[in-house]
Image (spheres, coloured by chain):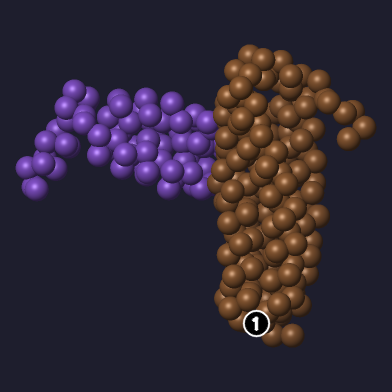
Amino acid sequence: MYVCICRVVTQSRIRASIDAGASTVDEVTLECGAGGDCGSCRDEIQTMLDKHDASDCDHCPRAHRAASASATR
Amino acid sequence: MKGHKQVVDALNATLTAQLTAINQLFLAAKVHEHRGFLRLARAAYKQSIHVMREAEPVIARVLFLEGLPNLQRIAKIGAAEGPIEQLSLDLALQQELCAKLEELARTALAHNDHGTAELAEGQLAKEQVFLQWLEAQQRELATLGQDLYLAAQVHEANPAG
């Protein structure tokens, strides 16, 4: 589905930029444009980021974040 | 007549769900039409216009209760990449609208606002008709499979309807 209608960005495109290393909504916006206009999809992008954080990401470029998060636990 | 703030808020929450439905279904109708799925286009178009008519008495009720109808706020529009996905987004949208109407009826009754409760319950029954249609589509889809189901959406069943 189209998460960001203003910039015509799909859910899979946003997932790709998260997989590529974007770790905040602003970074996602910078990478693929989603959330850069009216901002009404920013909550949804945040939810996608939260879900990604919760999942196992040892092998993605964001593994350092998961590692540092588990270190503080 | 001064209405209870919670009732006015519940009316405005219903209005938000309605305005969202009007826009989402209007977009869905035009996209279905563009892709050639005329039966789906017709159903979405009719429902969009229907909800717009339903929003009218809700707006009037807010004004009657001396509140300000909020036509500014709209929830996230569910725009799918394909017709099947759109149906599930529309189902979620319709479930949300029905939930808001149920909540409105409950809130109104809790504050002895029977006029608002009656309005909500009357609209709820009508919205459940479209909810039933959307649920039927999911069943048809499961029975027929995607290809057969979509083949059946190319023509309008009843051009006059």
Q: Which residue is mark 1?
A: B112
Q: Nearer the viewer, residue B149 or B35?
A: B149
B136 left or right of A28? right
Image height of B120 relative to B136, above or below:
below
Quadrant of residue B113 within the rendered picture = bottom right
Picture residue at 73% right of the left edge, 59% below the top? B123
Indicate the position of residue B158 as horizontal and vertical percent values: 88, 28
Q: Which chain is brown?
A: B
Picture residue at 43% right of the left edge, 26% below the top? A12
Image height of B157 relative to B96, above or below:
above
Whether residue B84 can be seen here: yes
Whether residue B23 can be seen here: no
Indicate the position of residue A7 as horizontal and vertical percent values: 54, 34
Q: Nearer the viewer, residue A21 or B117?
A: B117
Question: Which amino acid is tagged 1?
Answer: Asn
A70 left or right of A10? left
- The secondary element bearing badge 1 is classed as loop
Q: Colour of chain A?
A: purple
Indicate the position of residue B65 as horizontal and vertical percent values: 71, 79
Indicate the position of residue B88 as horizontal and vertical percent values: 57, 35
Quadrant of residue B64 within the rendered picture = bottom right
Picture residue at 59% right of the left edge, 70% below the top? B106
- Looking at the image, the residue that sits furthest to the right is B160
